[in-house]
Amino acid sequence: MLLHIIANPRPRGQSRSIRVGDALIEGYCEANPNAEVVEFNLFSEDLPMVDEAGVNTRIHQARGQELEGEEKQRFEHFMKYIEPLQKCDHLVITTPMWNFAPPWKLKQWIDTVTQARVTFEYTADGPRGLLKCEKAAIVGSRGGMYPEDGDPRQTHDFLTTYLKFALSWIGIDHVETCFADGVDAKRDQQEEIVKAAMEKAKKIGKSF
Ligand SMILES: Cc1cc2nc3c(=O)[nH]c(=O)nc-3n(C[C@H](O)[C@H](O)[C@H](O)COP(=O)(O)O)c2cc1C
């Protein structure tokens, strides 16, 4: 199963990030016609709050305590989003960059699915990710440019650096990225930029 996480409140047809994400899914479905794709748009989801009761629920779960009552219910809400991740073989995160980082809903999803004793554990040799997902891709679009060739602007990218590290923490180490960069800075070229990223994303999907 491929899990497609979309972190954009804008609809298909307006969102340039989703065009890139959908191109990847199209490539994947062409290469794997019988594969199941499960999609969540995080902006349509009621993700669990990590408020005082949420934090305590997670601490008690991490300590191996048996959860009861409200904490049990709260943890089931976390598991609603963790279970698809435990089941998937492939993960695609489709996102724009907001203020150099992930949109807040995507950060909330990371806070939801990063749970000790469920998606990672501490061992005598250090922390270990527990997910079995084979490959992931982080794709989308960004208003500016974040070249990966040692350009100083690369250091402003807390989106892919953060997401890659957060995924590796829970056991997903093989992560590819593909962004339509400069869609706002070079607005007159945005269509060509998006199409080039879609082509690259489709290839990634086919090779998954
Ligand atoms: C709240 C907000 C913050 C943004 N911050 C950045 C940023 O830090 N760097 C950047 O390159 N673009 C930034 N952008 C521009 C978006 O990354 C860009 O427009 C992206 O293509 C949006 O994708 P969409 O068309 O799928 O909505 C921001 C956009 C919004 C709405």
Image (cartoon, rainbow, N blue to C red):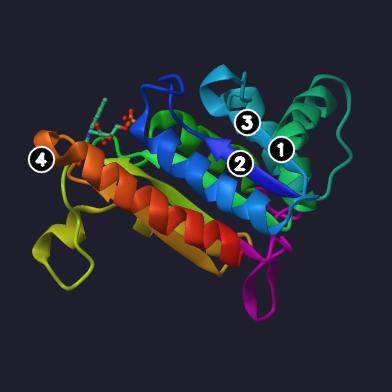
In the depicted structure, whether residue 20 falls above or below residue 138: above
Q: Residue tagged by mark 2?
A: 4
From mark 4 to mark 3, how far is it between C-alphas? 30 Å
**Does 131 appear in magenta?**
yes
* Residue 206 x %, y %: 58, 61
From mark 1 to mark 4, how far is it between C-alphas? 33 Å
Q: Residue tagged by mark 1?
A: 38
At 51% from the left edge and 61% from the top edge, which residue is drawn? Answer: 204
User: Do the residues under discs 3 and 2 have CB atoms within 8 angstroms?
Assistant: yes
User: Do the residues under discs 2 and 1 have CB atoms within 8 angstroms?
Assistant: yes
Q: Residue tagged by mark 4?
A: 186
4 vs 3, front mark: 4
Q: Quick one: label 2 or label 1, which is nearer the N terminus? A: 2
Q: What residue type is labelled 3?
A: Phe
From mark 2 to mark 1, how far is it between C-alphas? 6 Å
Q: Residue tagged by mark 3?
A: 40
